[in-house]
Amino acid sequence: MTMVAKKNVEDLNVSGKRVIVRVDFNVPQDKKTGEITDDKRIQGALPTIRYLIDHKARVILVSHLGRPKNGPEPIFSMKPAAERLAELLGQKVVLAADVIGEDAKAKAAALGDGEVLMLENVRFHKEETKNDPAFAAQLASLAELYVNDAFGTAHRAHASTAGLANFLPSASGYLIQKELDVLGKALSDPKRPFVAILGGAKVSDKIGVIESLIDKADTILIGGGMAYPFFKAQGYSIGASLCEDEMVPIAKELMDKAAAKGVKLILPIDNVVGDTFGPDAVLQTVASSEFPDGSRGMDIGPKSVDLFSKSISEAETIIWNGPPGVFEFPRLSEGTRGLAKAIAASKAVSIIGGGDSAAAVEQFGYADKVSHISTGGGASLEFIEGKVLPGIDGLQDKEPCRTFAAGNWKMNSGTPAEAVKLIDALKPLVKDATSKIALGVPFLAIPAALEATAYTNIKIAAQNCHFSEKGAYTGEISPVWLAKLGVTYVIIGHSERREYFAETDETVNKKIAAALAWGLKPIVCCGETLAQREAGVTFDWIKGQITAAFAGIPADKLCQITIAYEPIWAIGTGKVASDEQAEEVCAFIRKVIGEIYTADDAAEMTIQYGGSVSADNAQGLFAQKNINGGLVGGASLKAVDFSKICLA
């Protein structure tokens, strides 16, 4: 996965604006009193909140707390977090009685510059975790801008993370920016030797992480329960230790992959085992190849600590995720303590990947001796694995007009199996692309395509939608359905639909509005026929199409829209506009957007060229100043050809 810089809160004009900020205030509390026992997550959000206050934003905070199951539950109220935040800020924090109800709406509307509102627990609504577009739209209606500063939930495609970015201009906060900077640099350009330490109970949780690190790290140290399938793969007995037996063949494959890459994959050489699992177990230290019958592995032994510490002392970059033992029990914490001590003594850039590793570093008093403690256990793991995090991916790019390659399959590869086969062939070819990538697949293939592209840099587009949410429109597709499925883009006003199905500027406009209302990102097509070009009316025609299509579309929605210039005479004919012809019209389109809105709006508009784009001509076309990618037909049905376009 290639990191793409996202807008930071400083890139937004927040003065006087209502800004909804996703924070992670899921803080630990005393079970009896409800008192917050650790406010680090609240403190982590302070830089972003203070920036917004200082710049006269009207701040609306949204977070979850705990795992409420049946709607509002007083025990999971955000009240303690709001009160603690008020103490830290030294100013009042208003608490809404609900999330999207009348109280929240009234209090959000009443906010003054520099004032702060905390919404109630967003997970009081089941629609949050389902990323329900209607719920996300109601949340978005409270504000004018969106900032995500909750790295701990960035790997979840929830309404308050991924969903809000589909409706509002967006950016990251300082906390997320720091996570991306530190983790991103460690993975993309680490100082070497690069040592990764992985622990925890299950290999199955971290297969993708290990595979990713084999491509990046010099040494991988594996401890904890996840080492046991590796022991069994070498023929060792592990007594009665818990082990995912189905992972044993995979562990062998991972060892072989590491060896083939020249990566040192180091396992414990001794272990602390007990006669039962618990703090009072009878313990002994044994070699990794000599687990007694009936014994259970509980921690790595002192020789393993020394072995691991040697690699740690030689490292220039360290990432640690997962303890090597049951550190919650004091007698079984020596392995974890030993690794934490070695990391703290190291001069390397040291990154603790959240979760139990972060808790251990804090518990043993080494938090101030490491470079960075991640605020997201699951998110940092998926980031290391190379997955695209939905809560970050949807935020606006730092640099506007990033190349956008969209494939339109038309009436081809329409069965789920055909779509998945093509997508699976494409994924490895484009995993390091810096361009945005979308595939416009037939409707029947959308669910399978969404599953096949989950957590990748490939998004799914629908080839059309109706402007009505429901009704007697036999054979049509509602934008609501597409949004609820999780579709990102929708192609609107394609030249073939204009020609064959009487698509008009009026219906295109209605479809744009309908798509935006449900959080879909329209790819709006325009273009002239050969007769119109030869008659010299190209520019008048294009201006008419753009003006009509964007009628009534507010400027703050432009960040969700792409324009595709498709000369009808160059679609499926084998003819293609020259680089100069394509650039001339795309520059004119940008000029028209500037006249309708502002020059700044026009400068950030993504404009594609579509018309027999191929692997051979894409680079020349995309190099033009006003062409930001292509809407591609037949070439997108060939994984190799389309990958070359994505990488052009």
Image (tube, helix red, strand yellow):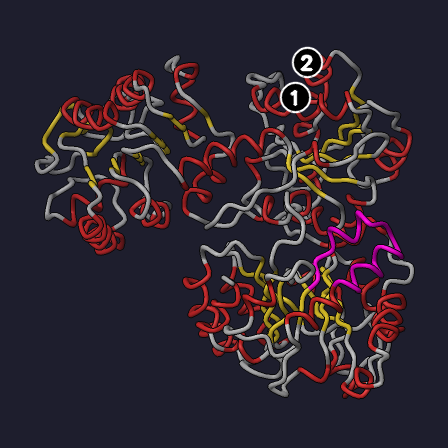
Q: Nearer the viewer, residue 6 or 472?
A: 6
Determine the CA span between mark 2 and mark 1: 8 Å
Is there CB contact under 8 Å for labels 2 and 1?
yes
The answer to if 604 sits in the magenta stretch is: yes
Q: Nearer the viewer, residue 223 or 566?
A: 566
Q: Secondary structure at mark 2?
A: helix
Q: From what the image shows, is residue 449 above or below residue 66? A: below
| Residue 545 on image: x %, y % | 85, 71
Q: From what the image shows, is residue 322 above or below residue 170? A: above
Q: Which residue corresponds to the image point at 76% horizontal and 32% vertical from the top-left?
A: 119
Q: From what the image shows, is residue 97 above or below residue 370? A: below
Depth check, mark 2 against mark 1: the one in front is 1
Q: Please name the predominant secondary structure of the magenta segment in the image.
A: helix
Q: Secondary structure at mark 1?
A: helix
Number of marks in picture: 2
| Residue 538 on image: x %, y % | 82, 77
From which residue to which does the magenta span run? Answer: 587-607
Q: Which residue is mark 1?
A: 46
The answer to if 636 sits in the magenta stretch is: no
Position of residue 441 in the picture relative to residue 507 (left or right): left
Q: Which residue corresponds to the image point at 29% horizontal and 46% vertical from the top-left?
A: 214
Q: Which residue corresponds to the image point at 82% horizontal and 59% vertical from the top-left?
A: 591
Amino acid type, residue under disc 1 in the picture: Leu
Amino acid type, residue under disc 2 in the picture: Leu
Which numbered marker is on residue 88? 2
| Classed neighbour count for the residue bearing mark 2: other residues with Cα under 10 Å, few (<14), some (14–19), many (≥20) | few
Position of residue 315 in the picture relative to residue 579 (left or right): left
Q: In which quadrant of the rendered view does residue 307 lie? A: top left
- Farthest residue, direction front: 580
